[in-house]
Amino acid sequence: MSNSIVIIPTYNERENIEAIVAAVFSLSTPFHILVVDDNSPDHTGDLVESLQTQYNTSGTRLHLLRRNEKQGLGTAYIAGFRYCLEKGYEYIMEMDADFSHNPADLPRLLEACKDKGFDMAIGSRYATGVNVVNWPIGRVLLSYFASSYVRLITGMPIRDTTAGFICYKRKVLETIPLDNVKFVGYAFQIELKFKAWKYGFKLTEVPIIFTERVRGQSKLSAGIFKEAFLGVIQLEVQSWFTKYKQTTK
């Protein structure tokens, strides 16, 4: 059994899911996959269920967690984290379904945690400049300066604070009180990094190239950006009144 699993949250990703699953399973590093589907109207979950027949002939490699409705990215990942922890996985990863994250980079994120001693490895668009393909300049600037804003407010030494391509050691997710994670969009990604950093875990950024999706529709909205902008201030203020028990190195 692999001790590494990739969580892929989906909502109307039927156009992408079969190809992304095949790409992950084609890697020489043996990853398992958990698809967390929020009752997609395009029947993404049904397609994943049919793929399980193909991929699970010699053990469960492709897992499916169905939820009743669309409840936000953050809650999808929290549900996925709980599932993976219960199943005993040691390395738990986040990745989008739309190929904006290159599956070929998964082994590099895993290596940073498994072999190089880091507790959390972040696939970073901004670790070595701006490595984004096919985004309009306005969106690039918004994303880049949003991360700069987060660093300014929190002091967190991460250049890509909203990144959603991540590898966690299980002890990070066991330490962070998942019941208390409150944000669902970009702010969710910021919150997990912020709390991991506050608990004293070792974070690193692994440079990646981020490519805008070709198929399907983006889930970004003005509300997500607003949540992130205000959420950063809330996180910082709340941290003044929170005791973070530092982890043992």
Image (spheres, rainbow, N blue to C red):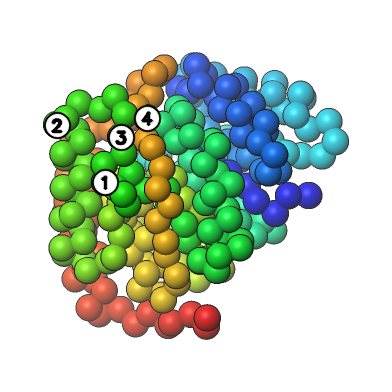
The numbered dot on residue 129 is 1
Q: Can residue 85 be seen in the rendering of this structure?
A: no
The image quarter in which residue 239 lies: bottom left
Q: Amino acid at mark 3?
A: Val
Q: Cα distance, mark 4 to mark 3?
A: 6 Å
Q: Cα distance, mark 2 to mark 4?
A: 15 Å
Q: Give the residue pinned by disc 4.
A: 211
In this rendering, the label closer to the viewer, 2 or 3: 3
Farthest residue in the right direction? Answer: 58
At 76% from the left and 39% from the top, the residue drawn is: 60
Q: Is residue 33 left or right of residue 13?
A: right
Q: Secondary structure at mark 2?
A: helix
The numbered dot on residue 138 is 2
Q: Cα distance, mark 3 to mark 1?
A: 9 Å
The answer to whether the residues at label 1 and label 2 have Cβ atoms under 8 Å apart is no
Q: Cα distance, mark 1 to mark 2?
A: 16 Å
Q: Earlier in the sequence, mark 4 or mark 3?
A: 3
Alpha-carbon neighbours of circle 4 within 10 Å: few (<14), some, or many (≥20)? some
Q: Give the residue pinned by disc 3.
A: 132
The image quarter in which residue 131 lies: top left
Q: List x then y, in percent, for residue 154.
A: 21, 66
The answer to whether the residues at label 4 and label 3 have Cβ atoms under 8 Å apart is yes
Viewer-proximal residue among 55 and 113: 113
Q: Secondary structure at mark 3?
A: strand
At 60% from the left and 29% from the top, the residue drawn is: 23
